[in-house]
Amino acid sequence: MNWPLLIFFLGFISIFLLRLPIALGMLMTSIFYLAAAPGAGAGMEMVAEKVLTNLEAKYIIIAVPLFVFMANIMNSGKITDMIFKFANAIVGRRKGGLGHVNVVASIIFSGMTGSAIADASGLGMMEIKAMREYGYDDGFSCAITAGSATIGPVFPPSIPMIFYAMLSGTSIGNLFLGGMIPGLMLGGALMIYVAIIANKRNYPLGIKHTLRDILVITVKAFPALFSVIVLLGGIYSGVVTPTEAGALASFYAILVAAFVYKAMGAKTLWAAVKETVRQTGTLSLIVGCAYTFSFIVTREQIPVYFSNILLGITENKYVLLLLINLVFIVLGMFIDTSTLTVVFIPIMLPLVNLLGIDLIHFGVVIVLNMMIGLSTPPFGMLLFITSGISDTPLKQVIKEILPMLVPMLLVLLLITYVPEIVLFLPRVFGY
């Protein structure tokens, strides 16, 4: 290990020990390395050129702020409220109905925004409040909200998949297709878990809706639900690219919120714009700093060393997939998903190519893996979000989420070792 690389590793460890903001920590570490490395000036010039030309010129990354904007519009424009009411009318009657509503609403919402955090913080507040009123345990309400929010980036569209496509060169359309069946499987697994817990704890039946009520609610919710058709229909019909679909669906969401539900004025729209700018600024800083970090990782051939270490343990493809899953679940508990994707995916890709693993399959597996990390104690971000918005002690949420991780991990193992679950739709309908 050379001196600049030692500085690099020590700086990376210090980020966590000193609890620095991850983006600024990576930037400082990268600067220290580049300053100490031979030909420092040339290295800094190369990094600046790559960030400004290679990264910022990638058209697909523009989709990220558009999906963030769409999520903010939906959370502030009554659209999430209509999604919740529709899900409640469809599945809310059964025992533990609001738990099932939580999952179904997340599946619908995930077809619009692709963000776990937007789901947990927007729909989550509404879901937890309703479950509390019906006598559900606060810890369970928060845990199922966090668990169901993980569906968002697995079922299309997906912000993490956009970053993965940018790094791996895979088709974003095929990645979105690949995530559909796993997303539905994850929702189904969580609903089975809810049914078991609801019977065990005797959670109440929901409100019974007549057929007329269901039809009325469906008609009212249709403009909101049509967002899914605008977004995914536009992409898979070939009419628009994923980036253009994000812009089109955002514009449609504004029209629905402002003119159909009359829940958005200039002030609300401006607030959504400001929040989008703030979130996009944070993401851009993370991605830019992580890209610099990745440049150093590649320059020092760390992926080669990492591959050699894993291959030294075993050359069995299936055991290696298990090890990669374990590594990403642990990392996902501590590191932001965007950072995890941009920094660690490039380290894994050479090994994945060497093993002959399909990049679409690997991308969906890793995205689900990272989402489970967001719900895994002790530092899963979704646990803190649901605990914070409901004023529920974190220890109660952790107690309830631990058994819920079992069905989520089972789905992860299934899609890891049965690639056809992921690849079936891309092979039939992909391009």
Image (spheres, grey):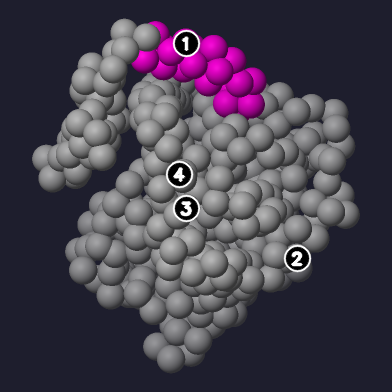
Q: Secondary structure at mark 3?
A: helix
Instruction: Report, in whole angstroms, how far the alpha carbon at label 2 lies from the one at label 3.
Output: 25 Å
Magenta-drawn stretch contains 44: yes
Query: Which circle's residue, 4 or 1, is located before the other in the chain?
Result: 1
Going by the numbered disc 4, the residue's amino acid type is Pro
How packed is label 3: few (under 14 Cα within 10 Å), some, or many (20 or more)?
A: some
Q: Looking at the image, which is closer to me, 211 or 103?
A: 103
Instruction: Locate the C terminus and report the quarter of the image it occupies.
Output: top right
Report the disc number at residue 307.
Answer: 3
Cα distance in 3D space between marks 4 and 1: 22 Å
Question: Which residue is tagged 4?
Answer: 303
Asked whether the beta carbons under mark 4 and mark 3 sit within 8 Å of each other, the answer is yes
| Image: magenta residue range | 43-63
Q: Is 305 on the left or on the right of 335, as rendered?
A: right
Q: Note whether 54 is above or below 315 in the view shown.
A: above
Lateral position of residue 52 relative to residue 18, left or right: right
Closer to the N terminus: mark 3 or mark 1? 1
Q: Earlier in the sequence, mark 1 or mark 2?
A: 1
Identify residue for label 2.
420
- Label 1: which residue? 49
